[in-house]
Amino acid sequence: MKRERDKKAVILITIDALRADHLGPYGYQLRTAPNLEKFVEKGTIFMNAVANGPESPTSFSSIFTSILPLLDGGFSPLPREKITIAQILNEYGIFTYGIHCNPNLGSFFNYDRGFNIFIDGERFRTVSKIKENKNLKQITFSLISTIIFNIKFFNKLMYRLKGFNKVKGWLRKIPLITDIILPFIPIAYNAPYVTNRVISVLAKKKKPIFLWAHYMDVHNPYNPPTRNILNFTKKDISLNRKEYLNENLLKKKKKIKITPAILDDLKLLYNGEINYVDEYLGKLLEFIQVRFQNNCLIIITSDHGESFYEHGFFGHQANLFEELLHVPLFIVELGKNIELHKIQENVQLLDIAPTILNYFGIPIPDNFQGESLLPLVDENSSYRERFIISECYQKNGIMKRNKDEGFIMISIRSDEWKYIHDEENNQEFLFNLKSDPKEQSNLINKELIKANKFREIRDEHVNKISLVDEKSKILRNIETLDLKKSLK
């Protein structure tokens, strides 16, 4: 088994805030991602993949640990009770590499555990308020960057100076320059930087390897290059309009009447960002196919979608509707000549970690709640209906990291039905996704038998969360007492 494992590679590519229904394979009319679309022609498309959380912290907790985010000590930071996929792979001698620049997925939140190399674009923007956790270099960079980030001048440059975006894009293509200037100006790892870094690593490293690359470009604010906007329209959106949409509308600084023109422009910018990522994703996928011609599993997905006012929201907080939870999921195994395979069964991001372990021939831990997707890919599995849970803590429309700060929001999905409970506002929703895919008709008071079944599942799950929370508090108190004793 080890010999077989040593011949394999797994590459997990995640694209932040990417909606499934803005991609051609899911029926979108515009070709926002032609390179991705072409690549998955010899792979598997999961038409009904569900995120287990509506924002990065909850969703990635599920991806990395295959345990629902509110269970077993929570999700932010990842508790020791939750073992990550990288830790397991590392124990079996597989080289692990991760690169991202999402502030919710850094080492402070324990996402570096198990990675041999972890390139964190937010490493100088330390989330921790505990100064003793920072070294002198981090403190210095943090102070300088804080001063600069608070100056509105740099944000104005984002929209006012065409040349600034061009220079910034050029600089990001050179990893060394990006690393030097990152601490001092608001520049994050974007698509060309991530792609160049990953290609550099894959060119040197041999199997076995697990590589995770996360692209942030599709995440708001939306400010794609002009060329990517012109792929969908004859005229670019003006700089003033971009600033208006990103600064005033998305950040909710002003009350604005939402018009069809506003939504069209926002979606145009969003599609431009997808198209921008696809340019560099195409280069990476082309390289991977040359570098690893067989025994390489590529998984491409998103942590969550994005709301465009379908239910009165923008962004990806404060709701659990399909525009946030329905995510793209593609699996391609190089070396297998298969035709495009579309799977209609419901799957979830909890299934990614078991799939990776299954591919490497590593036993799947008993506490993993997901299941390997490889039997579905190989078409040798009989489907059974599952209830898929997605959840988060939220308060006043803002994500919170634990029960002490927020209220539970939970959705439960079966094949056709979906239930949502908002604890803070004491609201319940029940939708038939087959007849009402846009979730416009709430049947909570009409389908009482269905509603009560979902309530039973909800109550059982919430009770587990409460029991786990109490256990975690007791363990934390014991650890604190032990620490105090050791310091005496």
Image: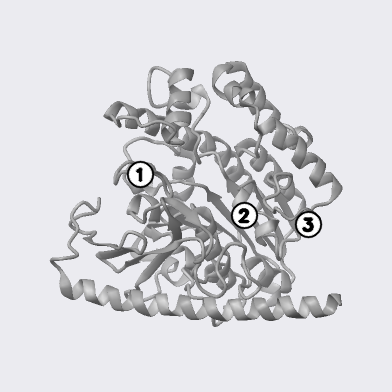
- Residue 399, compared with residue 482, is above or below; it is above
> Picture coordinates of residue 220 (x, y %)?
49, 38
Amino acid tagged 3: Asn
Left or right position of 25 against 227: left
Badge nearest the viewer, 2 or 1: 1
- Residue 38, compared with residue 376, is above or below; it is above
Badge nearest the viewer, 3 or 1: 3
Left or right position of 413 against 269: left
Q: Which residue is label 1 attached to?
A: 313
> Picture coordinates of residue 272 (x, y %)?
46, 31
User: How far is disc 3 from disc 1 in space, using C-alphas?
Assistant: 37 Å
Which image quadrant for residue 199? top right
Q: Which residue is label 2 attached to?
A: 105
User: How far is disc 3 from disc 2 in space, using C-alphas?
Assistant: 17 Å
Q: Residue at x 63, y 70 (%)?
A: 79
Q: Residue at x 15, y 69 (%)?
A: 447
Closer-to-camera residue (413/252): 252
Amino acid tagged 1: Phe
Quadrant placement of the N terminus? bottom right
- Mark 1 or mark 3, which is nearer the start of the sequence? 3
Which image quadrant for residue 421? bottom left
